[in-house]
Image (cartoon, rainbow, N blue to C red):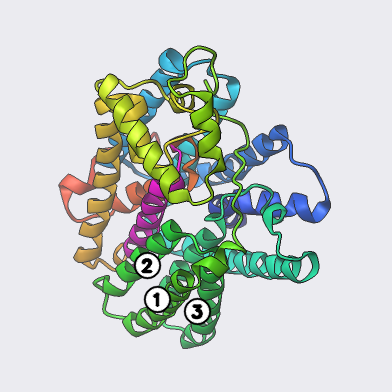
Amino acid sequence: MSGAVLHLLGLTLLSLLPIASLVYFLSLQLLGIDHDSLYFAVWSVAVWFIPLALLLPNFVRRQMSITAIDVAFCLVSVLLAVHLKVFTLHAALRDWVLLVTFWIGPYAAARLVSAQDITRFLRILGAITLTVSAAAIAWQFSLQLTAGDNLRPAMLGLNHGVLIVAVALGMSAVIQASAASGDNSIVTWAKPMIAALVTAALVMLGARGVVIATLATGLLMVLAPTRDGRRERVVVFAAILVGATLALILNDVARDFMVRVYLPLEPPAGAGVPGLGRVSQEACDQLKKMVDSTPIRIWLFQRGLLLFQEAPAFGIGLENFAAYTCPGSFPHSTILQAFVEMGAVGGIAYVLLLAIATFSLIGLAIGRLPCTSRPAIVVLALLSFFIILDQFYGRILLSSAAGLFLGFSASLVTRSEHPHLRGWPIRNSENSR
């Protein structure tokens, strides 16, 4: 098999990463196989390790630069590893596997993709995610018709935000691809399809955090400083706005369709450690009985602030939130988690990483360079989507999509005209000869 074919295969496999969990659980459901943590671990490793191996040869032949994003990412990764080693209660192999497969792995694989190949990747991503999201929505509706109104087993414990993630990725990628190629036929069929998918998913899920993240992403796409494709983006954003409005108006109806019970693959490390919990069993039992997620999130936020005040410098230890509150709980916000579990040191480093990537992409978009402007806008939109979404549902060690788009941000920054953004070049063995 030629190098070009292997490279294309690597990009295609890498595009499965943002929807890896969705594909995994839907496949098990269709095949009638019970979930096992070992199966998911093998799947997660394969999703990023195989494309990493396929993309590595082209990366070795390229000139490499170390950017500020790379430095900040390494700093956060070191802090995560130190906390797992020193502070995490009963840290197991699972936690180290999550650190590699969901955080470091996606970033490394995305970092191997050149700035020129990111546009190709986004086109592949758009086609795959639109297909998968359409199939997932059709599957849920078929269950609704055949199995009644109980959709809890439909996604086998998946967070209800996963489905809209696929829609948002496909939405952004297809718009970007159509604008770059000038193919009006793509825009013609993409607009009604995207409008239908986004509206259906938002009404079906009714999740406020997902609605906010999707609206912010769509608005960013509309306001992006490009000279083409703005009309198409406005149309799609209008469709998203209609879907979001319906989702909020029909919230009570939408709740009947929601997967309310989110069962983590495994409880966080340190969950339920005897004698360590600061919350009574009665309070935890009462919390579990709550149906509305709003008071639950408020309670988690308040507990997080109290825990941060107890250990403001270095935190209570990564993945230890459940041990100090209720078994199985987590902050539902990666920024809150960073400050509570890793203290001001880890929290500032994490926020700095997100800020450097975001403002670097804004600089690339404003610069309007042909090789970076359009993909930078799309990566910025997608990164913003996951950053916002992670403040409603996220855990740092499960932020695989955020790691992926942080890696793409670093790859794009290396093509900047501004030296302070481009980073510090490192000559590889081929260039040093």
Q: Which mark is residue 215?
A: 2
Q: Report the front residue among 73 and 303.
A: 303
| Percent of width and height locating residue 159 | 56, 50
Locate residue 363 relative to residue 41 in the image: left or right.
left
Lower sequence index among marks 2 and 1: 2
Hey, which quadrant is residue 23 in on the image?
Answer: bottom right
Specify few, some or many for label 1: CA neighbours under 10 Å numbering under 14, 14-19, or 20 or more.
many
Q: The residue under label 2 is which amino acid type?
A: Leu
Q: Which mark is residue 241?
A: 1
Query: Which region is colored magenta?
Result: 374-395
Lower sequence index among marks 2 and 3: 3
- Figure label count: 3
Q: The residue under label 1 is which amino acid type?
A: Leu
Lower sequence index among marks 3 and 1: 3
Specify few, some or many for label 2: CA neighbours under 10 Å numbering under 14, 14-19, or 20 or more.
many
Q: Report the front residue among 279 and 227.
A: 279
As drawn, 376 above or below 101: below
Dot 3 lies on which element? helix
Q: Which residue is mark 3?
A: 195
As drawn, 164 above or below 304: below
Look at discs 3 and 1 and give the one toward the viewer.
1
| Percent of width and height locating residue 218 | 37, 69
Indicate whether residue 391 is drawn in magenta.
yes
Real-space Cα distance between discs 3 and 1?
10 Å
Specify few, some or many for label 3: CA neighbours under 10 Å numbering under 14, 14-19, or 20 or more.
many
Dot 2 lies on which element? helix
